[in-house]
Image (cartoon, helix red, strand yellow):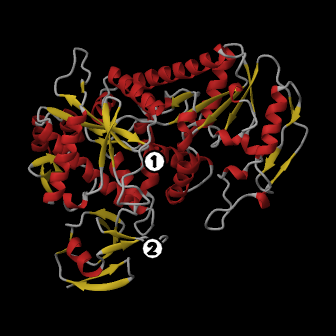
Amino acid sequence: MIRIFCKNDQQYYEVESGTTLLELSAQVCPEAVDPKTGKHYPVIAALVDHKLKELDFCVFYPHEVEFIGYNHPDGRRTYLRSLCFLLQRAVRTVFPDKVLVIDHSLPSGQYCEIVEVELDAKGHTVVYKVSPEELQALKEAMRALVERDCPFTKVKMLAEEASALFAEQHQYFKAELQRSLGRYFCSVYYLDGVADSFHGPLVPSAGDLGVFDLMPFHDGFCLQYPSDDDITRVIPYRRQDKLAVTLKDYSKWCETTGILGVSSLNRKLLAGEAVDLINLSEARQEREYAAVADRIFAERDRIKIVFLAGPSSSGKTSSALRLAQQCRVLGLNPKVIELDNYFVSRELTPKDEDGQYDFEALGAMDLALLGQHLNALLSGETVEIPRYDFKLGKPFFEGNFMHLEENDILVMEGIHALDPAMVPSVDPRRIFRVYASALTSLNVDENNNISTTDNRLLRRMVRDNRTRGITPEETILRWPSVRRGENKYIFPFQENADAQFNSALLYELPMLKYYAEPLLRRIHPSSPAYTEAVRLLKFLDYIVALTPQDIASIPPTSILREFIGGQTL
């Protein structure tokens, strides 16, 4: 018998050595309870000493165990990984001669495509356009697996054997990744006789995946999963075509470089082509800034204000500076107004549901004064711009006057810049709105995509530790609050942008690995951030890091210098 501490009910239990987590859950914790809402969720995974485990994990030693459901971030990821495998198995049934590619995240789910096994003459993937009838057949095949309650099983096998298995299934990126990692053994999952690999635990069986949907989207479709608020319904469907086009364009460009996933990226780095990749990526991004500046210049008689918004660590500050630089090249004279200077006094700041000041709320800004100043500037008047003292929590006027000449334009960056409610009194025809985010489109393999959110979290971790002395543990623990603010104040307004800019660079994950890996390894196993640190380290383990010599070749004007230092903008 061994002693287990169940974190859910703060009780100790004596269990027989070799008991599975599934058996233990049935005895002591059949449901996970959300501490904030009190809602009950079916248990789908567990944290054992802060490490994420499947429910078939056997306990042989004393542990702390926390059973989790869909209310937990790792529970949601476990559900989504399993749902992707469910879709993969259905694709094998409906399209036995084609391959599923799960490409990137959408506001309503995961964007997926069915591609032909053979590449075109240029070595690019050929997308198969799925008909409504075929999409319905996929859903029915998934439902059949759910009704049969087919179990997910995991086996250890030789990496060489797994690589051959995936190549036989035409999952060539998955096969190449296994070869490139240099490991002797790997884990392979099975569902109804079909093999696949996933970089994290799965739910016990297909019967746990009853909530999903497939919706047509562009050349492929959107795989929808349960809503955070109501797990009996899928996440509300929202088409965000501008964002999808931006991601698709970047994916196509990645194809032209020969980098279709982590394995091909690793191959280039190991071949000594890192500097070439850095230069190519930076050159493309410079063209992107120039293209946006060209659009502003073409309508300079109309446009006098440029608003730039984006989520945390998307490179908004650097993007604003780079865009302003490109506008200067064309003869315009950008002037910057910091939106942060228009905060209301601290005592007037609205509070959130926990009674804390909500500095990200629209009401935290003096919208009346901002609108008044912008209209005055557009009318040719001179205004005095405030300076906000964050220590005292008050704005001050210190003689900073501004007036717009003929070739002057305002550049303003902030989280609410795409929300029309920020300046309702200002003529929208005079405003050009830009949305910037690090929209990585690299995949680990065919059906394991790299999260844009993880990319930004690593950026923020590296920057905040370097510039503010914030520990990686603090960054991880603050991240859920940051994400809530983004979901509330930024993402709903993405489609209001006149231009969408992707600040991701092909070489940045290898660069971030060099800086972030040592930071993540400092987090102690007893820390509540340890689970997330282990997950991020496991993800980074698939990526070859840049060398210090490679990093030295990153230009001082690069957006990534905002995070690692050495920027000259």
- Return the disc, 1 or 2, that comes first in the chain's sequence: 2
- Could you tell me which secondary element the residue under label 1 belongs to? helix
Which residue is at the front of the view, 230 or 475?
Answer: 230
Q: Nearer the viewer, mark 1 or mark 2?
A: 2
| Residue at left offset 47%, top offset 53% | 519
For the C terminus, give its image quadrant: top right
> Residue 460 in the image: x percent, y percent?
53, 47
Residue 373 can be seen in this image: yes
Q: What's the residue type where badge 2 is placed? A: Gly
Which residue is at the front of the view, 533 or 301?
Answer: 301
| Residue at left offset 30%, top offset 77% | 29
Q: Which residue is mark 2?
A: 38
Which residue is at the front of the view, 294 or 462?
Answer: 294
Image vertical order of residue 114 relative to residue 257, above or below: below
Q: Which residue is mark 1?
A: 516
> Residue 494 in the image: x percent, y percent?
54, 37
Residue 59 can be seen in this image: no
Check disc 1: other Cα within 10 Å, few if <14, some if 14-19, many if 20+: many
| Label ID, residue 47 | none
Q: What's the residue type where badge 1 is placed? A: Ala
Q: Quadrant of residue 372?
A: top right
Q: Quadrant of residue 208?
A: bottom left
Residue furthest out toward the right: 399
Which residue is at the front of the view, 568 or 120?
Answer: 120
Check disc 2: other Cα within 10 Å, few if <14, some if 14-19, many if 20+: few
